[in-house]
Structure formats: C-alpha cells, structure tokens
Image: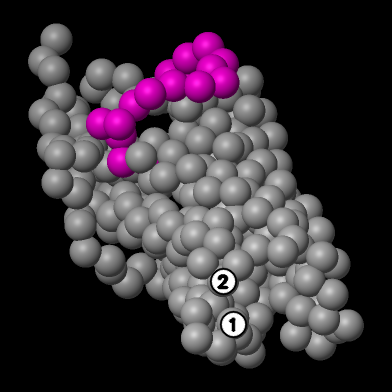
Amino acid sequence: MAQPEQRAEGAGPFTTRRTWYRPEGETVVWESRVARRRGVLSVRGPGETVDRTTTTADAEALRRLRDLNALASGAFVIGGALFALGAAVSQFGSGDALESAAIYFAGGLFFNTGGYTSLLQVLNAPRHSPGGGRLVTADWRWWGYEPTRLDWLSTFVLFVGTLVFGVNLLDSFLQGLSVQQVNRLIWTPDVIGCVLFLVSGHLAFAEICHRPRPCLRSRSLGWWIVAVNQLGSVLFMLSALAAFTRPATGGLVNAGIANWGTLTGALCFSVGGVLQAFERP
C-alpha cells in the first residue's frame, strides 16, 4: 500500500504542523495546538474546498483534555482576579503591604496550578500517528522531558515563571529589609518571572503561527488566547520595572504604574482563562 506524502512546517527546528497527502486524494493536517487542546485533525477530501475537523481521539482522551482545560482555565481566571484584587488594595486600600502580599500569594498558587496543568495538557495530549490516520493517546504522565517539542518548551517556561513569581511573593512577606535586599529578593525574581512569561508567550505565538515571528490570525481562538496573555505579560513587565526601589530615596520608581500594570495585566490573564474555557474538545 502506498504511503502518504508528508510536509512538515514549524518554527526553526520545531514541527508544529504536519500535512499528509493520501493517494486517494484526501489531505489530513495535524496542528500541535489544535490537536492537544481540541483533539482534532483537519481533513479535506478530493474536490472539497473547505477543511473539516475530525475528532480522532478516543473518548478517554477527550475527557482528559476537557478536564485539564477546565482546571487550567479556572486557575488562570481566579489567579488573575486575585492579582487584580491585590493591586487594587495596594492602590486604593489601606496601604497595608501584608494584606496585598497575602492576596498576591493566594493568586500565585492559582497561577502555579494553571502553569503546571498547562504542562500536563502537553504531556498527556493525543499524538499523531504515522500517516495521520488518527490521534493516539499514551498513558497518563505527571512529568516528562520533551525539549524538542515547542508546546512543551512554551508551557515549561510558563510553569517555571510561575514558580519564580512564587519566590517573589514569598519574599514579599519579609520585614525590615534594606533597599538592596528588597531589590535582590523581591524585585529581581519579579523581573525574571516576567521575562519567562514573555518568552513563553513568544514560543506560543511561534507554535500557532508555525514560524518564529508573530502573526495575525484574528479568526483563531487560540491566537486570541495567546495574544491576550502576552499583553498581560507585557503589562506585568512594565509593572515590575516601575516597582524598582530607588536606593537614593527608598521609594518605587512609580507606584501607580506598578499597581495599574499588575491590575490590568492580571485582568488580561483572567480574560485569557475565560477564552481558554471555550478552546476545548
């Protein structure tokens, strides 16, 4: 039996889209994000002009995808809302730093959950089979090392970013720190976490665009999720830069920008979480 011809596309060394041209004239397309989030392949029969999505994963795989997507979506919605609340308390509340720190820390736990669940979505997503016949589901895994996969790399960097933010949030409870200690123990992890979020978002754009540069795909729900979250990461970075403590004065560069950047950036992640709830099988 003749084997179907194949064409692989992606960003750099990573394959994010694979197309099979079957001898009978049918075309099957696997895209990494669509397959792992929705459990489908795109199929176009002979003479057809529009692709149709075909669910080729089994019922257990689809249930797994739905559960993981719901957990990740809810975690980012709640985590973003708590971060926004912490920023609002800092900007408009009593000014109690410990109160804001406690709210931020609670939000950080949800971001940790969302980041790890996103990694689980990649590890336990259905994989394409040779020839593009159907999606194959492997046994459940709690961890895996797959740096040759762009989706794994993006979600791994995101998860590490949430852990680094956790260091920042824990250190924010420390009292009696000097300006140098504040910048080293609180501000530096904050900036590193923001950089990791931005890198993760860039990799997510590369996955969905199948090239290193960002693209515009306004009809793609996945693209909007990535774009909204990346906007949130940019706002988080602006907030972090404004939160640097000046050694000469002991005050922040700009407390207003720091609080508003965190608040609006956090709301972006909440909106992204809501949108993600609809990116399901």
| Position in image of residue 212 (x %, y %) | 20, 57
- Above or below 3: residue 186: below
Out of 241 and 274, give the one closest to the viewer. 241
Quadrant location of the N terminus in the rendered image: top left
Give the mark nearer the N terminus: 2 vs 1.
2
Residue depicted at x 68% and y 51%:
170
Residue depicted at x 48% and y 14%:
138
Question: For mark 2, what is the residue?
Answer: 179
| Position in image of residue 137 (x %, y %) | 48, 18
Q: Was residue 139 drawn as part of the magenta stretch in this picture? A: yes
Out of 157 and 244, give the one closest to the viewer. 244
Prevailing secondary structure class for the magenta stretch in the rendered image: loop
74 left or right, relative to 2: right
User: Which amino acid, by three-letter code, is at mark 2?
Assistant: Val
Q: CA distance from mark 2 to mark 1?
A: 6 Å
Residue stretch in magenta? 136-151
Out of 264 and 134, give the one closest to the viewer. 264
| Position in image of residue 103 (x %, y %) | 80, 62
User: Which amino acid, by three-letter code, is at mark 1?
Assistant: Gly
